[in-house]
Each structure stands twice: as structure tokens, then as C-alpha cells.
């Protein structure tokens, strides 16, 4: 049989009971196989699920039986037969094969049980076929779809930013520099400033693109390349900004918890944890957060930014995300607007995920007055020439606006209950790895 024909059914439709008693053909990869005497069991995997196939000598042709008996894990194959209920089989269904054919036998698969983390990262291009990573990648897709739907329903436009830039949005220390026809340029750390440009035309926009950070540290929550969702809204203040973030997080948690509970359960995450997320999220000023950290035993002083330890302490016992807002102007980005009611603090907000995961969002109301922006740039010694275009936005019909940046892998790490951010992205880039 030709594997390119469209007469194959997905494994999931067999598992759902729709094909009981009908003759079907499936195609995919060998998940596991064993044989004894005249019986070979081939567990076949396609993108929709796995199912056991019983291939019996005498029932199928000799050549087909020999092929089934000789498969390796991950050989690709075709099976035709009739599905029947079988409680002993994984998923509760078994196909009694009437025919079996190899597409490609291949060579023995290098990944067996109990491999080291490093080995699995070296063979990531093969390990991505594993059930756990397959399910995580599906969930990741469902999460980004859900986020896109959320913004789509609210009249946002998706926009694309440049990746090669001249200016350093989040400060120079974590920039990847490249040679741009003889002059230095950088991989983008954030599309925010470009989102602000689109905002002046389309009002409510978001960017979903990779951001690059030359993070010199090894942590469980930093990648050097990650996917960054950056909404930017005209005529929004800090309060509206936080409200939108809260609604977005509740939306995506409930969407996955309701509609993809099986996948979550399969990867060891309780859907109830996501269904229990609901607003209003606790809101703490930076000042109150410092007091709380100190009462929990952290050594942080007023004036220092919260680090991973403090975020973990604040969120370890929490079941809801927590907003920390009004950070000190002194350590926040130059474009964040100072709070007229609390001078010395900016209209910022971070969102910390519960269960110890920590920061997943950084947001703020932006400075929209040109003179105020110039002054902050001078205070922070930023070269005006790199940012003239950004200041220009405040010269021509400027409006109050706000926005935020969400790290997709940080969100997934929390929602899926992962120990390490590298499992939230197919090909993690970290300080010691850019292969495969
Ligand atoms: P952190 O203090 O945790 O390094 P940050 O303050 O540098 O975060 P922002 O510059 O505010 O983060 O970026 C916005 C969001 O992008 C963060 O809230 C986070 O979700 C995500 N993010 C930032 N850096 C990384 C990274 N290296 N890897 C993965 N996600 C990141
Ligand atoms: Mn950082």
C-alpha cells in the first residue's frame, strides 16, 4: 500500500471508538514492539495517539509477519486491520492486523530508557518524538492559539517586529552583537518599541516573536532565545494594563484546563490547578513586596530589585499569580512612566506565577511626553541618536499607552508544571547549548 494515499485514519479516531468493527489502515512509527513465536505486537504511534497492533503468523502473509517481527523502535510502517476493544491494550483498543508493511526499517534507535539529561539534549531532534515532549509541544501550540484568540476577540492586530536592531531595549549587558555589513547591530531583546509604533496606527496590537538575551547565568528559567508576546495598547493606564493581563492569564489557564485536561494529566499536571486560577490576583507594591520578602527571611534591602530567590519565596505557597507594581524608577527601564502620585516609583507591574515559578510578565505604562523621555534617557546615559525615532513617537500626536511582555516558555513552564524552561521549547538555546 502507498503511504502517500489519503485513505489512512488517525489513531485517535480508533481510540474514540468510531472505527469499531471497520477495516482501517493506519500509518506511523513504532512506539514499542515485542514478539514471541507466531505473534508480534507493534505499538504504533502517529501524531494523534498510540495503538497496539497484533500481527499473527498465518493471518498475514509470511513477508508481512517477518517485517513486523523485525522492526526497530521508530521504524515507520503501515498496518491494516480491524480495531476491537481490548482492556489489556494501552488506550483500550487493539488492531488485529490483516496486513503489515514497512515504510522504512531504519537502524536501531539510539534512545533507550534512563538516558542522561545531556544525552537527551544532544539527541533532541530524536527525543522530540517522545510522548512527553510531543504532548508538551501540543499544549504549547494550544496555549499560543488561545492567547491569539484572546487578543483577536478584543480587536487587537498581530504585528511583526524586526529582529535585527540598532538599539538595546532592555540594557546592553545581555545583547548578542552581530556584524551588520561592517557596523555593529544586535539581535532584538524585545519588540516593544516597535509595538509602540504600531500602537500609534492600530491602537491595540501584539507581537509574538523571538527575543534574544545573552543570559550569562544557568538558571531553570532563562533561555538565550525565547518567544515573547508583547501587547501594546493606546489609551491604557497601569490599572487597565494589569486588568488585561489578569484576564489573559485566566483565559489561557481555563482554556487549557477545560479543553486539554487529558494532555495535562498525561504530562503529570493537574488541570484543576489551572481551573482554580481566578482574579483578582493579589496586587502588592514593590515596597510591600520587600517587607513581605524580609518577613519570609530573605536578605533583600529596600532599593534592590527582586531576584529569583525573592520571587520563589513570595510565590512558593501561592495558588494565584501575584502582581508586584510600582517598582523604583532607579532600577527600571527608562521608558516606564513615573507615578505622579508616588514619585520615585514607576507605573510598572511584574506578574509572578505561583508555586515558586516567579516572573512571567513585565509590563508598564510608558512615558508619553517627549521632554520627560529625554530627561530619563539623559539620567540613564542613553545615546539619543539610537533612539531618535522612539522619541519622535512622543513628538507627533502622542497618547497615553501601556503594554507588557510575556515569556511564552515561562508561562508554559508554570502551566505545565515543568521543572526546567528548556522543556517548554523544542530546541532550547542556553549558555552552553545551541545544538541541535
Ligand atoms: P528576569 O528578571 O527574570 O531575567 P527580565 O526582567 O529580564 O526577567 P523582561 O525584560 O521584563 O524580563 O522581559 C519580559 C518577560 O520576558 C519576562 O517577564 C519573562 O517572562 C520573559 N523573559 C525575559 N528574559 C527571559 C529569558 N532569558 N528566557 C526566557 N524568558 C525570558
Ligand atoms: Mn533578565
Image (cartoon, helix red, strand yellow):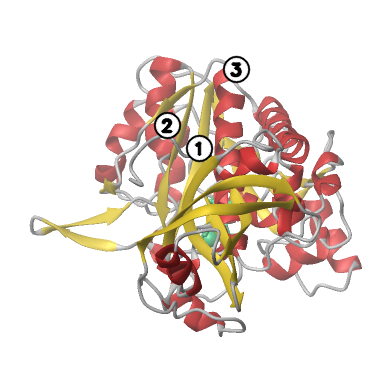
In the rendered view, tell whether residue 89 sits above or below residue 152: below
**Residue 223 spot, x, y in % from top left:** 49, 64
* Residue beneath disc 3: 154
Q: Residue at x 71, y 37 (%)?
A: 17
Decide which of 175, 74 is in the foreground and name it: 74
Q: CA distance from mark 2 to mark 1?
A: 7 Å
* SS at circle 1: strand
In this rendering, does residue 352 appear at all? no
Quick check: is the Cβ at mark 3 less than 8 Å away from ligand 1?
no
Quick check: is the Cβ at mark 2 less than 8 Å away from ligand 1?
no
Q: CA distance from mark 2 to mark 3?
A: 17 Å
Does 66 sit left or right of 310 as displayed? left
* Residue beneath disc 1: 230
Quick check: is the Cβ at mark 1 less than 8 Å away from ligand 1?
no
**Residue 289 spot, x, y in % from top left:** 81, 55
- Camera-near label (3 vs 1) is 3
**Residue 204 spot, x, y in % from top left:** 51, 20
**Mark 3 surroundings: few (<14), some (14-19) or many (≥20) residues within 10 A:** few
Name the N-terminal-most of marks 2 and 1: 2
Name the N-terminal-most of marks 3 and 1: 3
Q: CA distance from mark 3 to mark 1?
A: 15 Å
* SS at circle 2: helix
**CB of mark 3 within 8 Å of CB of mark 1?**
no
* Residue beneath disc 2: 195
In this rendering, does residue 187 appear at all? yes
**CB of mark 2 within 8 Å of CB of mark 1?**
yes
**Residue 134 spot, x, y in % from top left:** 56, 56
**Mark 2 surroundings: few (<14), some (14-19) or many (≥20) residues within 10 A:** many
Amino acid at each position: 500500500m502507498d503511504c502517500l494515499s489519503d485513505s489512512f485514519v488517525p489513531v485517535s479516531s480508533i481510540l474514540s471508538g468510531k472505527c469499531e468493527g471497520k477495516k482501517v489502515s493506519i500509518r506511523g512509527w513504532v512506539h514499542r514492539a515485542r514478539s514471541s513465536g507466531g505473534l508480534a505486537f507493534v505499538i504504533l504511534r502517529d501524531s494523534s495517539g498510540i495503538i497496539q497492533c497484533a500481527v499473527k503468523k498465518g493471518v498475514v502473509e509470511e513477508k508481512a509477519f517477518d517485517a513486523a517481527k523485525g522492526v526497530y523502535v521508530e521504524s515507520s510502517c503501515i498496518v491494516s486491520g480491524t480495531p476491537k476493544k481490548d482492556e489489556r491494550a494501552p488506550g483500550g483498543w487493539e488492531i488485529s492486523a490483516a496486513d503489515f508493511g514497512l515504510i522504512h526499517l531504519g537502524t536501531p534507535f539510539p534512545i533507550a530508557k534512563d538516558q542522561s539529561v545531556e544525552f537527551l539534549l544532544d539527541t533532541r531532534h530524536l527525543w522530540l518524538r517522545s510522548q512527553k515532549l510531543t504532548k508538551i509541544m501540543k499544549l504549547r501550540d494550544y496555549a499560543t492559539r488561545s492567547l491569539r484568540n484572546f487578543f483577536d476577540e478584543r480587536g487587537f492586530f498581530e504585528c511583526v517586529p524586526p529582529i535585527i536592531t540598532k538599539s538595546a531595549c532592555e540594557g546592553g549587558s545581555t545583547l548578542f552583537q552581530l556584524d551588520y555589513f561592517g557596523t555593529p547591530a544586535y539581535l532584538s531583546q524585545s519588540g516593544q518599541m516597535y509595538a509602540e509604533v504600531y500602537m500609534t496606527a492600530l491602537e491595540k496590537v501584539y507581537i509574538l516573536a523571538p527575543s534574544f538575551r545573552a543570559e550569562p547565568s544557568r538558571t531553570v528559567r532563562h533561555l538565550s532565545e525565547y518567544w515573547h508576546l508583547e501587547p501594546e495598547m493606546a489609551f491604557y493606564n497601569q490599572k487597565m494594563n494589569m486588568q488585561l493581563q489578569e484576564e489573559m492569564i485566566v483565559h489561557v489557564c481555563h482554556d487549557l484546563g477545560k479543553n486539554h485536561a487529558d494532555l495535562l494529566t498525561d504530562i503529570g499536571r493537574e488541570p484543576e490547578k489551572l481551573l482554580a486560577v481566578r482574579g483578582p490576583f493579589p496586587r502588592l507594591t514593590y515596597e510591600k513586596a520587600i517587607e513581605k520578602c524580609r518577613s519570609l527571611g530573605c536578605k533583600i534591602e529596600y532599593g534592590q530589585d527582586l531576584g529569583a530567590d525573592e520571587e520563589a519565596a513570595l510565590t512558593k505557597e501561592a495558588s494565584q499569580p501575584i502582581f508586584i507594581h510600582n517598582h523604583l524608577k532607579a532600577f527600571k527601564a527608562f521608558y516606564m512612566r513615573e507615578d505622579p502620585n508616588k514619585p520615585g516609583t514607576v507605573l510598572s507591574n511584574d506578574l509572578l506565577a505561583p508555586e515558586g515559578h516567579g516572573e512571567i510578565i513585565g509590563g508598564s505604562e510608558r512615558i508619553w511626553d517627549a521632554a520627560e523621555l529625554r530627561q530619563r534617557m539623559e539620567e540613564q546615559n542613553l545615546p539619543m541618536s539610537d533612539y531618535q525615532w522612539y522619541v519622535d513617537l512622543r513628538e507627533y500626536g502622542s497618547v497615553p499607552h501601556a503594554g507588557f511582555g510575556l515569556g511564552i516558555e515561562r508561562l508554559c513552564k508554570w502551566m505545565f508544571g515543568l521543572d526546567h524552561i528548556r522543556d517548554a521549547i523544542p530546541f532550547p538555546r542556553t549558555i552552553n547549548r545551541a545544538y541541535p
